[in-house]
């Protein structure tokens, strides 16, 4: 279906006749309607629903008062909504006309062929083949879906939505009818000799059926409560994860304090090492000059012959005693030669002196070697001290930074959350135990019911009059069971498709890397890559709601030619979105706005000024085919109210007019 | 035994087809007429069990 034109006459806030033409350009498939609160967005959405199905959404106030008040005051008693649309290459005009109340109305659909109008015999049937009523609510998004993931009844809402779009209405009513009919036959078994027992067993089966139903409802309720608690736990855990930042800071601080203490000890050790090093090596460093002078002196004395290295005392004495010179000449005591050699004794040194000089030389050489090594040792000791002091500065700076970060954190609150989380976990576990008990009760009751049914069958077999009713009862129960199993299988397949679709959409629009989990009983949760359940902010709930709607629309499109006789076919229909960006932040609005034109072939998007922000308009600009403003007219005078003017494509438009001829709204097309 | 089960299955499928067709008829054209729909459902069930009684 492609919407072409919507005409409203004296319908709610539209006084007189008003119409808008919607964009049918596949490339510019968005019709954008700007409207502030109370100007008629919800009325337009409900006008479509009412025209096609004679119903409005539950949130539509004063549903029985459809005729515009000024029109009534002017003596008019009727209102109508007309929708021109295209479906299967044919054009149609659907028109619902009311004489006042929402149910007192006429509905017609005309097929338009070359200007010729042909009235369809069964308009309700026809419109249900175009968009089955159960599916229509999912194409007209009035924010209800944004809340579908909240509240205790969320699983029920999601299940109904999946069944609606799957076209399960026929199977569902068949199951309900078969259940009713089975009970009818069981109670029809005629009076007989066994009738007293049969009545008792039949009553027991009724009681057990009620018990099972009640236990199932209680179990469902408990599962819903557990989901809410789990969500609260996930919320607290998320906050604690943020608080875990505080815990990490605290851990970092403890570590830094330890590191600082160790660095301070290293500094003290390095300082003593340095002092020791100075003590050990100081003499080498300060003795450099002494060593040099001493060595020079020894060398010079030897050169000058003051140190008698060539003559030693023992050698000269031996020569004198032998009275013979080393040249072989005789040395007679008293001779000149003897006196000359004897004079060498004055310069000659003995062994003790030579040994002392040798030791002095060795000591001086050692001093020289150690003096070469001393600067390196000192340098190393200095470096250790400098390193320790640098580490101390680093740890002190780190501690100052951590201290500043920790200053604003309330650790008592964190502890409180921790306690609350543990309390909620306990509560959820207690409820899980209750679910288990409830499940056992259901199984016991089902077992007893099956036994009672066997007993009943046995008794009925003995009674020809009852036998036929038992056969009918058994057939109803068998068919009901079979349809229930088939419905479960269909839903399972549908859930899988929808889950993938929603995950794909979230991947494109959400800033978090999360996956959608949808359990068999339609519990919805967002989990991260490691499977931890994440809390959903109100914005993420709205995003999830939109993604769910987009997935339903896509699923309906995939099923438009489905051949299964048990299920209604899917459909391709326009998507009407009323204020879809309400809870989203600016980034989510922009990414969602980028995705909105892809959600359906034709999109009607209604936004308020605050929602049509720069990012949204930038994302949509190239996809807008038609653009309108809903202007509010007031008979009252402006008084002190400031003018309400908005600019569209450079043109000023007053969105609230005063001293007007009527109270109501009008469409003004924005020139593009 | 298998043939008997298969025959019973097929017979049940035929009954289900009739029931769904009835639901479809009322879904599109006779919404709200629950009593009438259930009366016709009983007709289907009674026809399906009449040969066996």
Image (tube, coloured by chain):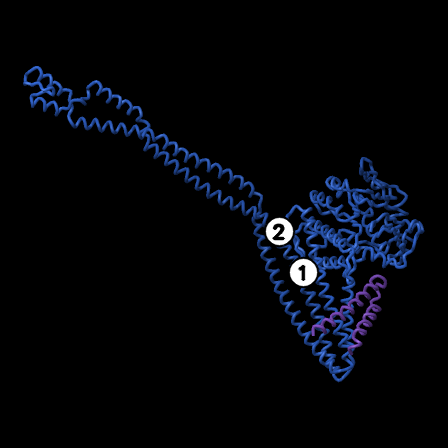
Chain colours: A blue, B purple
Residue at screen point 5% across, 18% down = A332
Q: Report the residue marked by disc 1.
A: A520
Where disc 2 sits, the SS reads: loop
Q: How far across and how far down the image is residue A427, in percent?
A: 61, 60
Q: Earlier in the sequence, mark 1 or mark 2?
A: 1
Q: How far across and how far down the image is residue A344, in percent?
A: 13, 19
Q: Report the residue marked by disc 2.
A: A528
Question: Which of the 4 image quarters holds residue A212?
Answer: bottom right
Seen from the viewer's position, the closer of residues A15 and A125 is A125
Q: Is residue A551 left or right of residue A532?
A: right
A395 above or below A541?
A: above
Q: Is residue A519 left or right of residue A91?
A: left
How many marks the image carries: the answer is 2
Q: Chain of mark 1?
A: A
Which residue is most to the bottom? A193
Question: Which of the 4 image quarters holds residue A164?
Answer: bottom right
A202 above or below A258?
A: below
For the residues tagged 1 and 2, is the chain the same?
yes
Q: Which part of the image, by quadrant, shows the C terminus of chain A?
A: top right
Label 1 packing within 10 angstroms: few (<14), some (14-19), many (20+): few
Contact? badges 1 and 2 (CB < 8 Å): no
Question: Which of the 4 image quarters holds residue A564?
Answer: bottom right
Seen from the viewer's position, the closer of residues A180 and A143 is A180
Disc number at residue A559?
A: none
Residue at screen point 77% across, 64% down = A171
């Amino acid at each position: 279906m492609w919407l072409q034109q919507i005409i409203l006459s004296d319908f709610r806030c539209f006084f007189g006749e008003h119409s808008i033409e919607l964009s049918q350009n596949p490339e510019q498939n968005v019709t954008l309607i700007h409207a502030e609160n109370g100007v008629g967005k919800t009325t337009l959405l409900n006008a479509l629903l009412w025209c096609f199905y004679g119903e409005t959404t539950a949130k539509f106030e004063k549903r029985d008062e459809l005729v515009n008040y000024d029109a009534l005051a002017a003596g008019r008693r009727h209102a109508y909504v007309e929708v021109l649309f295209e479906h299967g290459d044919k054009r149609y005009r659907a028109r619902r006309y009311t004489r006042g109340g929402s149910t007192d109305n006429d509905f017609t659909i005309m097929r338009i062929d070359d200007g010729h109008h042909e009235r369809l015999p069964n308009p309700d049937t026809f419109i249900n083949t175009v968009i089955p009523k159960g599916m229509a609510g999912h194409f007209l998004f009035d924010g209800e879906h944004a809340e579908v993931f909240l509240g205790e009844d969320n699983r029920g809402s999601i299940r109904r939505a999946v069944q609606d779009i799957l076209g399960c209405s026929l199977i569902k009513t068949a199951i309900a009818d078969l259940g009713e009919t089975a009970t009818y036959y069981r109670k029809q078994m005629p009076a007989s000799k066994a009738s007293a027992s049969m009545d008792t067993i039949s009553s027991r089966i009724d009681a057990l059926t009620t018990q099972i139903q009640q236990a199932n409802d209680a179990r469902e309720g408990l599962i819903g409560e557990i989901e809410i608690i789990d969500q609260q736990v996930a919320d607290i855990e998320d906050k604690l994860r943020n608080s875990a930042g505080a815990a990490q800071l605290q851990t970092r601080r403890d570590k830094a304090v330890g590191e600082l203490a160790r660095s301070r000890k290293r500094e003290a050790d390095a300082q003593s090492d340095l002092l020791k090093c100075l003590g050990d090596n100081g003499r080498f460093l300060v003795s450099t000059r002494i060593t040099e002078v001493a060595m020079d002196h020894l060398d010079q004395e030897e050169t000058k012959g003051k140190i008698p290295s060539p003559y030693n005392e023992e050698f000269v004495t031996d020569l004198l005693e032998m009275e013979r010179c080393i040249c072989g000449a005789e040395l007679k005591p008293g001779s000149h030669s003897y006196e000359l050699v004897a004079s060498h004794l004055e310069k000659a040194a003995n062994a003790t002196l030579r040994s002392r000089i040798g030791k002095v030389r060795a000591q001086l050489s050692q001093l020289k070697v150690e003096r070469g090594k001393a600067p390196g040792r000192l340098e190393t000791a200095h470096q250790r001290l400098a390193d320790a002091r640098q580490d101390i500065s680093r740890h002190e700076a780190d501690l100052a930074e951590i201290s500043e970060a920790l200053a604003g954190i309330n650790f008592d609150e964190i502890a409180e959350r921790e306690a609350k989380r543990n309390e909620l976990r306990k509560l959820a576990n207690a409820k899980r135990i209750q679910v288990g008990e409830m499940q056992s009760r259901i199984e016991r009751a089902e077992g007893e019911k099956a036994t009672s049914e066997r007993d009943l069958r046995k008794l009925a077999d003995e009674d020809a009059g009852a036998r036929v009713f038992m056969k009918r009862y058994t057939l109803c129960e068998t068919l009901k069971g079979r349809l229930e199993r088939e419905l479960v299988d269909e839903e399972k397949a549908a859930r899988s498709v929808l889950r993938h679709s929603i995950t794909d959409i979230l991947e494109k629009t959400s800033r978090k890397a999360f996956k959608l989990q949808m359990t068999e009983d339609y519990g919805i949760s967002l989990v991260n890559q490691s499977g931890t359940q994440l809390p959903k902010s109100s914005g993420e709930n709205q995003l999830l709601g939109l993604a769910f709607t987009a997935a339903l629309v896509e699923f309906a499109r995939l099923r438009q030619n489905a051949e299964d006789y048990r299920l209604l076919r899917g459909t391709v229909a326009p998507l009407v979105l009323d204020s879809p960006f309400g809870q989203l932040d600016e980034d989510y609005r922009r990414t969602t706005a980028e995705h909105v034109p892809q959600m359906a072939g034709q999109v009607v998007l209604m936004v308020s000024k605050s929602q049509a922000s720069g990012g949204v308009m930038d994302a949509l600009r190239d996809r807008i085919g038609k653009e309108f403003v809903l202007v509010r007219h007031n008979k009252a005078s402006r008084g002190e109210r400031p003018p309400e003017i908005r600019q569209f494509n450079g043109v000023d438009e007053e969105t609230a007019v005063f001293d007007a001829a009527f109270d109501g709204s009008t469409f003004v097309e924005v020139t593009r | 035994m298998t043939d008997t089960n298969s025959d019973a299955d097929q017979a049940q499928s035929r009954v289900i087809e009739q029931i769904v067709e009835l639901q479809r008829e009322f879904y599109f054209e006779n919404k709200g007429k629950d009593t009438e729909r259930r009366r016709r459902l009983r007709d289907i069930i009674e026809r399906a069990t009449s040969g066996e009684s």
